[in-house]
Image (cartoon, rainbow, N blue to C red):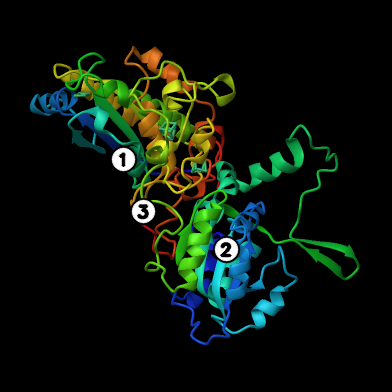
Amino acid sequence: MADTPLESDLESLHAGDTAADAPDLSSPAAKLKVAMYWAASCGGCEISFLEIHHHLAAFSDAAELVFCPCLVDTKYSDLEATDDRAIDLCLFNGAIRTQENLRMAALLRRKSKILVAYGACASSGGIPGLANTSTLDELMERVYLTTPSTDNSEGVLPRPSTEIAPGVELQLPPLLPTVRSLHKVVEVDYTLPGCPPEGKQVWMVLQAVLAGDLPPPGSLIGAGRSTVCDECALEKRDRRVSRFRRPQEVVPDGETCLLEQGVVCLGPATRSGCEARCPGVNMPCRGCYGAAGADPCGDLGLKMVGVLGSLPEPGDEQEIQSVVDAIPDPVGTLERFALADSRLPQAVGPSSSEGERP
Amino acid sequence: MENPTPHAPRLLGILCHWCSYSAADAAAAARLPLPPGLSTLRVMCTGRIAPELVVEALRRGADGVLVCGCHLGDCHYNSGNHKALGRLRLLARMLADMGMEPGRLRMEWVSAGEAERYAELAHETIAELRELGPLRWPTPQSEKGPSKRHG
Ligand code: SF4
Ligand code: SF4
Ligand code: FES
């Protein structure tokens, strides 16, 4: 993959990387200049920001939103025209899917003192990262041609540029070969995970920013140091599982650990911070806060393989096999929010026995 | 496509101390021919093999991984090999979903007395890997990324 457009683009982008330093709010009139940007994302992160509820009033006294395409009509050209490092805090959500995402990541890096990977997609690829199960060609074919709900008899595919009248061209940002998390393309000062981040955590982080009280750059913020299991009130009895079932096939008893009831819960490998929201309402954790632990190679899905593989009752080979085979779509289930950052091979396509690919 | 030099596969054998490593030891002592390209790693029990370890070997140039442990029921720690089996079968499904050929990850039971079987397994697996050709695994991206990670 050495010569993908992404790789060559990155070389030139890194020149502008800067590290974080605290915004200067010493003058009483100075307001914290905040940007919020969405790359490949769903908009949920912007909404999560509103979950600071009434604190929004206090926050807007101390800060102003200088760039946020979701809420404020600002143009890319306005942003380009501002001084480098003019933005104190940039909350960047969404994964890096297109050339436009990549360009904006580099631009906002240059314009921001503190760049935060906000939410699961920016932190670890999130749901958009699941596209890395396919090559770009497979993805285009599936999405635009072969899904059952698609009627595209002329086989129209999105193109980077289309001439709609003589001399008039419309442009679409080209897709990159793989989806990446923000820290894979620019230097990120802080990671604030969650799909979306919890309002309580967001407010704690904003307070720390306003107080100039952030941990050293490179740190995880707005999340705990433990696991979701640790915050989960359900009772753990260390029982083996004879059959895994999908959440809709089980009526949970509301008392015991969901995993022990045969529901695939990612709590053991997911970092704490959400106060175990999902198991708290009898839904399994899907891992949106990312892999627990300080291991920079921490791979949520692989950690969960370690957990789940050890759960079947000791039996013969077929018995064990049939228990783990009942886990549907292991990549989509166990790497749901973290495939783009995972150690698994990405966007390789069908195995070579089915034909050589570049 | 012309391929003048046939692919020389690299196989990592991960062997449990109590059974399979003894078999490998005995195979070497008996001067049974073992395939070049085979490296071995001894662990106390297959139940100790983190899925990350297997994936890391494949990322770093192994064309395949052969895990050998005590026969089911014979694990020195009772159920380590049952756990390893569940993990590796699940991992194999994920790797297959991401485009890796199933023949590259194999788990077998080899007792201390089965030196010949161990040697045969190693030859057989290497032959299969030769057939499959080099592992197509994208260049690890994280090593190229600019950022320091949180932790
Ligand atoms: S596995 Fe899920 S349900 Fe069980 S203790 Fe952990 S978070 Fe709670
Ligand atoms: S329980 Fe898991 S999926 Fe649910 S909010 Fe917490 S980390 Fe996210
Ligand atoms: S000791 Fe051999 S597999 Fe556990």
* Chain holding disc 1: B
What's the distance in space between the residues labelled 2 and 1, CA to CA?
33 Å
Do circles 1 and 3 both sit on a common chain?
no
Residue pointed to by mark 3? A296
Identify residue type, mark 3.
Pro
What residue lies at 49% left-to-right and 53% top-to-bottom?
A193
In the image, residue A169 sits, relative to residue A32, either above or below, namely: above
Q: Mark 2 lies on which chain?
A: A
Question: Looking at the image, is A18 positioned above or below residue A239?
Answer: below
Residue B40 visible (yes or no): yes
In the image, which disc is placed on residue B53? Answer: 1
The location of residue A228, given as percent across then percent down, is 42, 41
Amino acid type of the residue tagged 1 in the rendering: Leu
Label 3 Cα neighbours within 10 Å, binned few <14 / some 14-19 / many ≥20: few
Residue plotted at (43% across, 65% down): B146
- Check disc 1 and report its element: helix, strand or loop: helix
Answer with mark 3 or mark 2, whichever residue precedes in sequence.
2
- Do tag 3 and tag 2 residues touch (Cβ < 8 Å)? no
In the picture as drawn, the residue positioned furthest to the bottom comes out as A27
The answer to which of A276 and A260 lies nearer the viewer is A276
Measure the alpha-carbon separation of dots 1 and 3.
15 Å
* Residue that carries the numbered disc 2 in the rendered image: A92
- For residue B109, above or below residue A98: above
Label 3: state its secondary structure.
Answer: loop
Q: Position of residue A282 (x, y in %)?
A: 52, 30
* In the image: residue A149, left or right of residue B116: right
Residue at (35% x, 21% y) in the render: A239
> Image height check: is A61 above or below B49?
below
Which chain does tag 3 point to?
A
Circle 2 residues within 10 Å: few <14, some 14–19, many ≥20 = many
